[in-house]
Amino acid sequence: MTERRRNLYILLFVAGLAIASIVIAATNAPRRGLDLRGGVELVYQAKATTNAPVITPDTLDRTIAIMRKRVDPTGTLEPEIQTAGNEQISIALPGFQNPAQAQRLVGKTARLYFYDWEPNVIGPDGNPAPEDPAVTGVETGGAGNPLSGIPLFDAVQRAAKRKPVTYPNRSHNETFYLVDEKNKKVVAGPQGLEEDLFSDETAEAAKQRSTFKVVKVPNGTTILQAEAPAAKSGADEGRAPKRQDKWYVLQDQVSLQGADIKDPATTTDPNTSELAVSFDFTSKGRKIWEETTKRIAERGQEQLIGGTGVQHFAIALDNQLISVPQIDPQDNPNGISGANGSQITGGFTRASATELADLLRTGALPVELKLISTSQVTATLGQTALDQALVAGLAGFAVVALFLLIFYRVLGVLAISGLILYSLFFYAIVVLIPITLTLPGIAGLILTIGVAADANIVIFERIKEELRSGRSTSAAIRAGYKRGLTAIVDANVVTFVVAFILFTLATANVKAFAFVLGVGTLVSFFTAVVYTQALLGVLGRSKVITGRAAFGAGVKEKAPRRFDFMGKSKIFFSLSGVILIVGAFAIGTQGIPLGIDFKSGTRITTGVEKPATEQSVRDFMASQGYPDAKIQKISNEELGAQAFQIAVPSLQPEKVQSVRAALDKEYGVGDTFSNTSVGPTFGTQIANTAIIAIISSLLVISAYIALRFEWKYAVPVLIALTHDILIVGGVYAAIGSEVSSATVAALLTILGYSLYDTIIVFDRIRENVPRMPRATYSQIVNQSMSEVLTRSLATSFCTLLPVTALYAFGGETLRDFALALIIGTFSGAYSSIFIAGPVLVHWKEREKIWKRRAVAVAKSHGGVIPAYADAPKAALVDTSPTGPVRLSSDQAEQVSDEEFQAMVRDLGVETATERKPKAAARAAAAPAREAEDVDPNDPASVRKAHARRRREQRRSRSEGDS
Amino acid sequence: MAILAWVMMGLAIWHFMIWLPDRHVGGIVGSFLVAGAGGALGGLAINGFTVPGEADLGLAVALEGIPGAIIALAIGYAIGVFRENAEAARATPGALKS
């Protein structure tokens, strides 16, 4: 297949893809994340239970399936429920505006247990007291009644005295409570693990007060809250009655479980008109039910003499008594048949009865869930954020397109067509998979526009270089793609690997960003390299692009830029040192302001309608029980004229809702209230993950550079990247901008991009080393840098353009994110040129070969090493050519006029005085022979002489060896 | 945060090593590692091997990274010079005799 035909096929394929993408884009809408359409997100930590002692992927999948049934019984709400790591579940509920309600719906374990009441209720002496009506509650009008219960503090003390017993059917293992002995209050619990008792608030309080103690309730004992008072008449639509601080201590011997019932439904008791939840039994459940009630009835009959003999059984849901109905042995001497099922009554309202029926229908969660993070975004804010992100995206695209057009003219037009195709393909992939678009995801997308353009810049600069060195247009295009491809592949692989690491380790939002970045890198490689190469291949002979001016290459050959990068490196190093000193002072004095992602806490962002100041809001929060709340007035158009950010220790959703209600009453918050809560566990995990992500990214990048170049090239890369990270950290500390997990993601991404520049420089150094056989390493690096400086600066500038658009138009949420990208881009470009290069020179020049060369060059130049190698006569050739000269028919591989001139210079100065006698004689004769034969103005003559010279060198070497 | 400030100060000082002849043990990379580690260890030593908390941050914390980094770099440089001299002496045994 000819090249032209292959290119045409590629273009046809691209056209087909474009049509398909247009159809897909026109017929599908992208799925928007919560930050773009509003809703509630909850993150839970799964905890093992007696039923599921180990958290496995299967356990999490079953939990997710149950949660999905609970929140989306009709399958129309599109909740996003997914595992995050090995033990976490993240639930995004679009449209929800009440985190507390969402938590009740999905986070409730909903484990239903039936207990035989009398033999299990524990009295004050720590033993069951079945016949003591004061203990069982019969004396006060009903078992399980709040009147007979005791405060939780007393219940915990009573339970703690019990000895551990392991019942085969138990609801849980040992549990822990945090109690305040002075005020006789239970502060936290029950928890399966002692460390889970300590949230932000409790940990702080426990530190300050010595009266806080952890109390263990042993295995075999459970504490259940007394029934709720009966619902008042007409309370059908109202709130469920509030439970009192009344509790019972029971032996944890479960008779029947939620898994033994089926078909729960809301119903009304025909006798009392009370709302109830009816259910049937499974065959196993029915058998157990009949046996249990029979046993209870028989026990009641034994007590008929001298009493009523009435016995009870308790129905409990997640540590709360729902109902404790009685069994009259006279009415049911053989127990109760389970054939017609049963029903639970317990002061239900319509809503609470329906909720319980739904929970029982979907079943209990196999694991316990601990809420570790919540966030809530209002729909209005989400829409505004989307609009801003779209404006930022369009602006980013426009400035990159303009830059390409001005800098590369016709090639720029082709690159823009590649960018349009990239955007189209990417959008089609987003709606097809579908990828949930979040704000960080859109930021990733905007950023990849820069990557796609960078790939074009690398190639176009190479084409311009080839054109300037005298190649024809078509040969320059081929050579440009061929020689530029290595750097592009290297940079794309690094970006992709960073994206993969982020995707593997990060939390949901950053994961979306990483996914977009990874997919974007692949798609951009296709459009920026494969598509534009095919297009240029087809157009290569057309009049439109045959002129140099069409490429922006200029009619005249530009003089190479001669800047002594290595000579001036001391100044640039010192400049970096000063910046780092400033950064160290900033970090040492203020620290890096870590966001709640890392430190945990609740952050509320809200607009207020009534006049307010920071102090008035602070006073108000203090009156609500948050004296340490940090209040900051912020400027945010979407939130109205007055907006505040309130930071308090991590709060549970119910508390957040109560704060919202209070703020609304005092100031009027409307629908601008949004909040994010991160628990300490999650915060620590995010911080650890960020550190792991940074370290693993650095290691993987180094390993890749070591593989592609040599290991000594990896060290300067690591140092330059460390330099970038520290500078970004220092700037954040100096300006007091908050660092979030998204900032870390941005930082890692920009590290990948800054490598683009470093790889471009290193690639050229690698290319120039064999081509400059007598130059010192610093001269080679100087030469390489001067050759690729424009390219390096152009790629950095091109990345900076969309990032700046993101900063300017992306709105509040993306501003911090974009800031990290901007600082990182500057620092990355700087460190690629002024840190990585000089470190490489110092590091390599410790090798003997380069030391010798430096000594020789210095000797021949009066003790000074010139910045560039080409002007003076060089000394000995102490490196050997790596292989025979290949005369390729491929125009791209043939040397250009400029390279011929370089060879001429090389050949005119070579000597071989240090060869061994026999070889030396021949070698010594060579320059003379060359001087006679070679016509410096005839490329063919030069090439011939060069090949002859190499043959002779090889022969000399083999003779010397033998 | 204090450790980060110390390491950063150490690495900042490392940047100025470029003004000296490259004789540090391990070269520029060796001095990079030594500077960072020296800054951190020096800071720890000054604070009795405890890390100041966020409430204790201040100008002094950043300065505490300086002595450790300088001492470590000086030791590394001295070792480098010593090794270089020893190597030179081995390469020219005649010079030793004289």
Image (cartoon, rainbow, N blue to C red):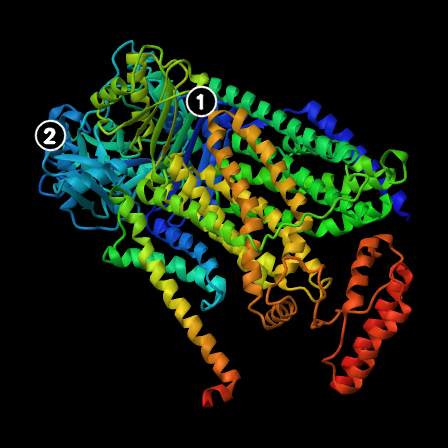
Q: Which mark is residue A307?
A: 2
- Could you tell me which secondary element the residue under label 2 belongs to? loop
Whether A178 is drawn above or below B27: the answer is: above
Where residue A733 sits: x, y (%)? Answer: 38, 39
* Nearest to N terminus: mark 1 or mark 2: 1
Q: Which mark is residue A733?
A: none
Where residue A806 sits: x, y (%)? Answer: 55, 29
Mark 1 chain: A
Horizontally, is A960 left or right of A933 in the view? left
Amino acid bearing label 1: Phe
Instruction: Estimate how packed mark 2 is, as few (under 14), some (14 to 19) or many (20 or more) residues with alpha carbons within 10 Å.
Output: few
Mark toward the viewer: 1 or 2:
1
Write down the residue under mark 1.
A96
Whether A942 is drawn above or below A236: the answer is: below
Question: What residue occupies the far front of the structure in this picture?
Answer: A862
The residue that appears at 64% across and 35% down in the rendered structure is A449
